[in-house]
Amino acid sequence: MYYSGIEFVFRKFIPTKKSNALPTGVIWMIGLYILSFYLASHRYETRFNIIQNRVNTLLAQLTTTTFKYAIGRISEIQNMECPEKPDFLKPKTIFNSILFEDNKNQEVIDFLKRIVEDYKADLAGVNFRNIDLQGVDLTGANLQGAFLSHSNLHNVILNEANLQGANLRAANLENAFFWKANLKEADLVGANLKNARLYEANLQGAILGLRTLRDADTGELVRVAGANLQGARIGGTNLQGANLSGVNLQGADLSPFGFPLGTQPSADNPFGKLNNGSNEPVETRLLGVIGLTIEQLCKVKSLNKAKLEKEVLQKVMDNCPPCILERTGCEE
């Protein structure tokens, strides 16, 4: 008679001599493993089928006049969580699928990214809040007035894209490319533009600085940090009238950037292709900028040939390191 569960399991592997029973522990283990795989597979397939049905519905709506509404649901589908797909020959995937928290399905995310690329010419006003477009090529995209707040646009290519009036609040734009992009009056409060390339971009009237906004959940007024432009390359950018209150400009390069003839920036080639065949440097315009302090400007890597008001330029010369106005800029 077994007096504990531990002995019961033990005797499945090593039976007593009196019982004359055969060891069946290995068979039990194989059976439990198969059962675990079945449960994990059933759980995964059930959830994945729900996501797949949502994707199929979206694809059907893309052929209708309401395709913009359908595309606006992409972020919702991308954020649907799914268990890890179990692999019978990989025990870790089975136990992860059963025991651990669900995650977003990368295969679905990548498929939906390609849909956005296909429809990039007509995405004006679309709601892309919380969308993942990391690494997507949106060159020449029309995103005028689009909602891209809290979205993942890391390493995205937005060269010559129209983002006028777009909401990019708290978006991750690290290492993004904005060559000649139209960001006029765009809302970039709290956005991460670290190491972004904004060569010759139009940021006229854009909002990048500190703002007091009303929290959507609590209704309370909250102070939102300015955009992070640390290490960003913004040569030739039009910042006229932009709000830069509290913006992090540490290590930013505002010097003109002369592209090699016939090239333009891209993810694979940071120097990319110029359509006009000119490699003349274009000055950065900082006239009429709101909230920009000398302390912010002194943290910039280079202000070579940047267009500043005479009074501001004099303060820069009096308070900032001399190298900031030199062609090579200051070392980080």
Image (spheres, helix red, strand yellow):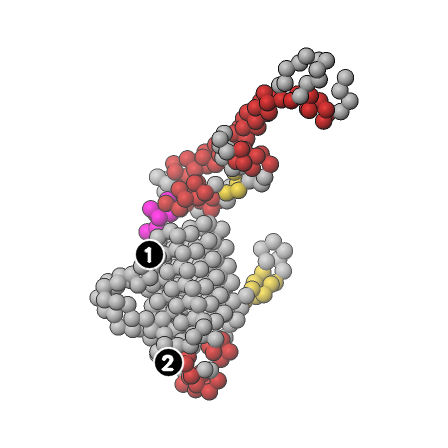
User: Residue drawn at (37%, 60%), measured in percent from left and top?
Assistant: 177
Residue 135: tell me if it is visible. yes
Residue that extends furthest to the left in the rendered view of this protein: 277
Q: Where is residue 331 in the image (x, y as percent from the top left)?
A: 43, 75
User: Quick check: 10 above or below 92?
Assistant: above
Q: What residue type is labelled 1?
A: Asp
- SS under mark 1: loop
Q: Position of residue 284 (x, y in %)?
A: 36, 74
Q: Position of residue 96 (x, y in %)?
A: 56, 37
- SS under mark 2: loop
Q: Position of residue 220 (x, y in %)?
A: 63, 60
On-image quarter of the N terminus = top right
The mark nearer the N terminus, 1 or 2, is 1
Q: Which of 93 and 182 is in front in this view?
A: 93
User: Residue drawn at (54%, 36%), measured in percent from left and top?
Assistant: 92
Quickly name the residue at label 1.
268
Q: How crowded is mark 1: few (under 14 residues within 10 Å), some or many (20 or more)?
A: few
Magenta span has 121? yes
Q: Magenta region, mostly helix, strand or loop? A: helix
Quickly name the residue at label 2.
326
User: Residue drawn at (40%, 59%), measured in percent from left and top?
Assistant: 176
User: Residue drawn at (49%, 31%), measured in percent from left and top?
Assistant: 89
- The stretch in magenta equals 115-122
Magenta span has 252? no
Residue 293: tell me if it is visible. no
User: Quick check: 100 above or below 15?
Assistant: below
